[in-house]
Image: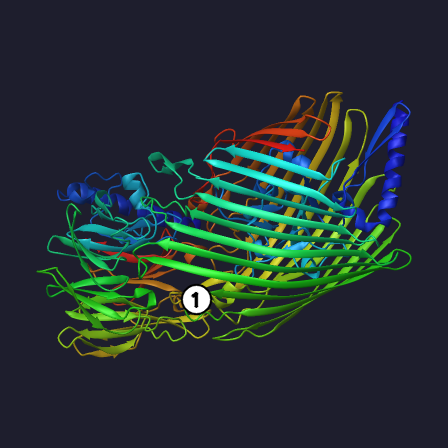
Amino acid sequence: MMDVRNVVRSGMCTLLCMSLALDLSAQHESDTLVGSIGEVTVQARQISPEISSSQPLQTLTRSEMEALGIREMAEAVKRFSGVSVRDYGGIGGLKTVSVRSLGAAHTAVSYDGVTVSNSQAGQIDIGRFSLDNVESLSLAVGHSNDLLQSARAYASAGVLSIQTERPVFGKSSEKWRVGLRGGSFGYITPSLRYARKLAQRTALMVEGDYMRADGIYPFELKNGKYKTTERRRNSDIYSWRAEGNLFHTFADSSRLRIKSYFYKSERGLPGVVILYNPTAKERLWDENFFTQLVYDRKISDSWQLRALAKYNHAWNKYEDVNVKYAGGKQTDVHRQDEYYVSAALRWDLASGWAMSLAQDAFVNTLRNNIDDSPNPVRFTSLTAWSLNFRRGGWSAGANLNATFTTDEVESGATPADRKHLSPSLTLAYRPWSSQLFYFRAMYKSTFRVPTFNDLYYRRSGNTNLKPEDATEYDLGITWSAHPGGILEHFSLKLDAYYNKVSDKIVAFPSVYVWRMANYGKVEIHGADASLSFSSSPFDWLKARFNASYTYQKAVDLTNPKAKNYKHQLPYTPRHSGNASLALETPWGTLGYSLMMVGKRYFMDQNIPENEVEAYCEHALALSKELNLSAETNLRLQLEVTNLTDRQYEVVKYYPMPGRAWRIGAVMEF
Amino acid sequence: MNFRSLFFSTLCLLAVGTVFTACEDDDDDSWNNGATVALPKNRVFILNEGIYGKNNASLTFYNPATKEIVPDLFFSQNGYKLGDTAQDMIEYNGELYIVMNGSNYITRLSGAGVELARYEFTAEEGQPRYATADDGKVYVTLYSGNVARLDAKTLNMEAMVKVGNNPEQIIEEDDKLYCVNSGWGYDNRLSIIDLKTFKEAEQVEIFANPQRIVECNDRIFIQGYGAAYPDPYTYPVALFDPQTKTYTEIGRGTNMAAYGALLYVANTQTSDWENFTTDFYTYDTRTGKVNSESFLKNAPEELSTGNVYMLDINQENGEIYVGVTYYEAGNGDIYRFKADGTFVEKFESGGQSPNAMVGLD
């Protein structure tokens, strides 16, 4: 009996592997195939792209996030190995992602396939995105074999992709979803979604939510012999989000998706905790609107096209009230616009060869209320040429990315145009066709263009800046199997990497003046390991376990005479890891997760005074899905974060919240 | 080598012991009242500004006799931290006053660093910058555009006088207070307050963005950026005439200190904002002449390319202390020179960005 099962499973897997190997574009779909052969129920997953990909790739699906009670984008991203999230704490606190210590500006964030940009500061606050409508979240490092990627995605050292849900209709051509969540620190968020099948091949989905929180949470402040309980002040947040999606499949089976997004928020910025001085009066208002369209067309068996266009508008106002400003307050208003088009054409040649050409063009503008602002306008062209090859157990890819940027300013110096070529290479080998076991190797060179702040910021901007270069090397193995018996499935991923950042753009001090300069040099040696398995020891229980560990030696090599020479970069732990366990039963799902972050330094010099304590955070979630009728279901969820009420900081003197709870109910009908 | 350092350490320990024993024998070691760490009579204190938002300002004790260092003396003596962004430190009646810009208070410390009084400024009064003391009062510049008068003993707030925008350094000279107003680049005035009335300030236009003011042999010297924005920064150092209310430029400089009849100037210059060099020169108030020869002898080579953040002179003996900053990249370094400019030693300041030194004996 066991043998038959195994044989059937292996056979299914092999078949699937073969069919998948032929269809690269299917990589991002994660259906579960369920078949039945006699009395034996066979459940075989397709090869996860995380295993077969020649680039380090990690994914979290909606169901995994729900089982673990992950409700915030930053919480989800923290679970990826090799990633650090700079989290300033609280619901409205800034949260940025850095992949393998390359810095936030080297990580692109894409929302439904289109890159989100911030040409002013270069980093994306992932705290602004809701997880409510997210279907999957994935993080890809280095070279990608997806030939229909935009050139912009190729140009980044890492890409965090946010994929939102598509509506699924039952018998009815309408679908509603109503949700309400609330919890500690005055948090409440109602949400509403409506989807309608407008025609046989056209669907519309609109959704919106409102969020508010007073954000006042207690924290422990240690100051030598004094230990006091303080409260985080001025951390209220109000936000509104609305999204509209139109899906259409044409008669020739090409697909169009149009998305419009609107976000508006107002928040207090609690700022850094300053001893003896609790004043915090900074506030920030944000507005963001974008509309994007993505068109996919399979022109013939060997030709495929993806085209996209986007308009993005972002506005923010920062205000600080303090007698130190002339007039008693400082108000900065910034407005950024982006116009973006991209097209990628893929050509599948005979005998395992495929190539593509992607061309992106975009214009970015920045306006603000600061005197003598140069009001820069930047035009960027990115061209990516890629080649893939597959034969036998081998697959290889090469990419060459050409960048051209030119800035125009209304006043002050104009930086020189930038032209840059950056290559990448990848190789994967599967030695045994019976085993889902792969070796992979990757090299990628990328760079980041100086942001508007780097170039033009009042007093510190430097229009002579060169781009900041990053180089990545990776060697890894992946292994996945379905051994049968109690152990349904397991997978293992090991990667060792070496990264280099040169001409790093840093604020460089001299003569009581800070100027941006291409001064820094960083070297990173790292290793990521992750293990996951699922098991069904009883009919009524399915357990899923995940663990990952990251080692990073990221040192500053800027100046051999400096006191921080060869010291670990600030906020970069040598060791970090996380683990999670989800237990699914007919009575509900219990999720437990744990995150460990080792000792770090909050300053460049690695001396005991500059240490930030290691911490361990536990979270627990309980959820239950009730099918009230064929078309109606209700999902109830309870989450407790920071179960042990551990007082810790990700960024020094930005305390993180202690134990907190949330409850939520979502009804779909 | 090992034997040498062991021998040296033993010698240091012996020296410390001798000094401490000497202190115990001496009836007058009242500065050690309430101190956890007893300090010798001859004391040097270095104030480390720290990095904004990191709450890591600190006071370092340096024993000039033994070269022994006690980092974060404030914490050792008081059991809690000094706080965020230490801006200024002055000596008055054998005690120390530290102005905490980020943490928004001024504190009075005993001659051993034990906190005796503190005044926390309100949000309306604004963050403090620099201080000077005279006749039982401490005067503090506040970023609200005021100079505050506090009782030097109790640190009770007594009165405020409006000056320019973002006032910086302040001195007392001939019953008048003089402070410069930077306005974060946009002010160009010197404010003069009559101490007897302490009612209103007279405003005198000088150059743009002034930062420092020093009294030397009854003369007043002012220094600043000379412009609101970096590209035309000129770093003027000038002699201010309180009679005519005019100034005469004597040279360029980024730091000034006074001892006896000499004004000591450090001038850090750059052409590309990445590489910089520092020159040291003096101005003799008696002759009115600049001596462009460096007042430092056999200074380590690296000092000429270091980022000089502090230039202070021990008023007890004329020894020169030059502080170098690496900002976030590491703790600062102090270079100590004898009064005649002979290099004595270099030591780590115990915190980031050392910006003030006080010597007591």
Q: Is residue B110 above or below residue A442?
A: above
Q: Quadrant of residue B327?
A: bottom left
Disc 1 marks a residue whose amino acid type is Arg
Q: Is residue B221 left or right of residue A341?
A: left
Q: Is residue A88 above or below residue A544?
A: below
Q: Report x, y in % for residue B181.
A: 26, 65
The residue that appears at 24% across and 66% down in the rendered structure is: B180
Q: Is residue A88 left or right of residue B53?
A: right
Judging from the image, what secondary structure is the residue with disc 1 in? loop
Q: Is residue A378 left or right of residue B158?
A: right
Crowd tier of the residue under label 1, counting other residues whose Cα lies within 10 Å: few below 14, some 14–19, many 20 or above: some
Q: Report x, y in % for residue B75.
A: 31, 42
Q: Is residue B320 visible?
A: no
Q: Quadrant of residue B231?
A: bottom left
Q: Chain of mark 1?
A: A
Q: What is the count of numbered marks? A: 1
Q: Where does label 1 land, which residue?
A: A458
Q: Report x, y in % for residue A522.
A: 57, 57
The residue that appears at 53% across and 38% down in the rendered structure is: A189
Q: Closer to the camera, A137 or A483?
A: A137
Q: Is residue A165 visible?
A: yes
The residue that appears at 89% across and 31% down in the rendered structure is: A8
| Residue found at the far left of this picture | B196
